[in-house]
């Protein structure tokens, strides 16, 4: 495990973007596993800036996102589809047919999970998986108590996760379920890049990286990954021994 300490938000974004850019440069047709939420916004902005300067080319890159709300239309403002198009896809030269997310509107959950698993396998697996971490230690939407052995599945969101994401649903109507890559799908990625900022993440980060490996802290399994890079700010690292 490598841990890089970022001195501020911009430094965190640049460090993480450097690591992801290196992946794209070394393997132009790499498969990137992507995340949404507040954590990766600066990283995506930095990638866009380097793309505009001519330093990065996304024309062969393929992406698979970690998760999507069940029941959410792709063009709904709170969908993860929309988030990805706004923050990254529409701003770089990635091909629309090479970006993949779970289909929130799929009529049957089991079929959708199998389909999305097959998408990941069909791409040959993930070269680099980007992760944020929830205040309860979740990764993707793998909530505390979730089995480590799962691949793509549909989960009921916990109250903690709903509270953390409530700000994106001003009408208060947040979905109860989401599709997520499972821990097994995440652990099968060749490389993992975990980013965390702010003191709200300090407890989960310390427990995940230095505590016992337990399904109660889903991110703790990452200790067993042989190519994990963490980029975090001082606040997020403040409870590390
Ligand atoms: C997002 C995702 C989540 C977030 C986590 C942290 O695709 O899978 O696990 O990474 O909830 O969210 P932020 O970055 O908003 O604190």
Image: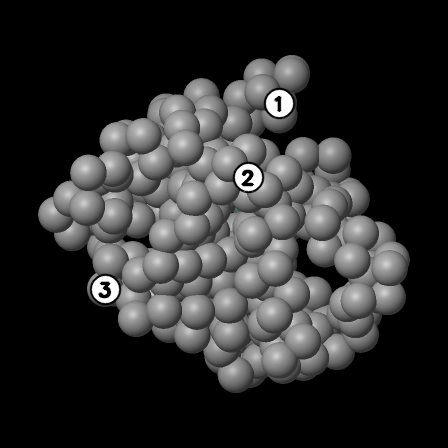
* Tag 1 residue: 169
**Seen in the image, is 115 located left or right of residue 170?**
left
Work out which residue is located at the far left of the displayed protein and give it.
212
Could you tell me which residue is drawn at 65 percent across and 65 percent down? Answer: 21
Percent of width and height locating residue 103: 62, 55
Residue 121 seen in render? yes
Badge 1: few (under 14), some or many (20 or more) residues near its Cα, within 10 Å?
few
The first of marks 3 and 2 along the sequence is: 2
* Tag 3 residue: 224
**Seen in the image, is 62 located left or right of residue 75?**
left
Q: Nearer the viewer, residue 157 or 48?
A: 48
Work out which residue is located at the far front of the displayed protein and give it.
7
Could you tell me which residue is drawn at 36 percent across and 69 percent down? Answer: 227
Q: Which of 20 and 220 is in front in this view?
A: 20
Work out which residue is located at the far top of the displayed protein and give it.
171
C-alpha gap between disc 1 and disc 3: 35 Å
């Amino acid at each position: 495990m490598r841990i890089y300490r970022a001195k501020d938000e911009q430094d965190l974004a640049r460090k993480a973007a450097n690591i992801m850019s290196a992946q794209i440069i070394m393997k132009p047709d790499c498969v990137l596993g992507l995340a949404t939420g507040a954590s990766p916004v600066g990283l995506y902005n930095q990638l866009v800036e380097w793309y505009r300067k001519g330093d990065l080319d996304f024309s062969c890159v393929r992406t698979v996102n970690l998760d999507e709300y069940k029941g959410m239309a792709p063009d709904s403002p709170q969908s993860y589809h929309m988030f990805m198009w706004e923050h990254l896809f529409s701003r770089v030269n990635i091909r629309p047919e090479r970006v993949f997310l779970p289909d929130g509107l799929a009529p049957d959950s089991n079929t959708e999970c199998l389909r999305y698993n097959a998408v990941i396998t069909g791409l040959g697996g993930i070269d680099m998986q980007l992760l944020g971490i929830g205040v309860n230690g979740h990764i993707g939407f793998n909530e505390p108590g979730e089995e480590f052995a799962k691949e793509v599945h549909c989960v009921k969101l916990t109250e903690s996760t709903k509270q953390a994401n409530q700000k994106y649903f001003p009408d208060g109507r947040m979905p109860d379920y989401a599709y997520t890559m499972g821990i097994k799908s995440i652990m099968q990625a060749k490389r993992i890049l975990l980013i965390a900022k702010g003191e709200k993440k300090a407890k989960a980060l310390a427990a995940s990286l230095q505590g016992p490996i337990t399904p109660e802290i889903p991110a703790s399994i990452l200790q067993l990954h042989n190519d994990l890079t963490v980029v975090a700010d001082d606040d997020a690292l403040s409870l590390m021994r």
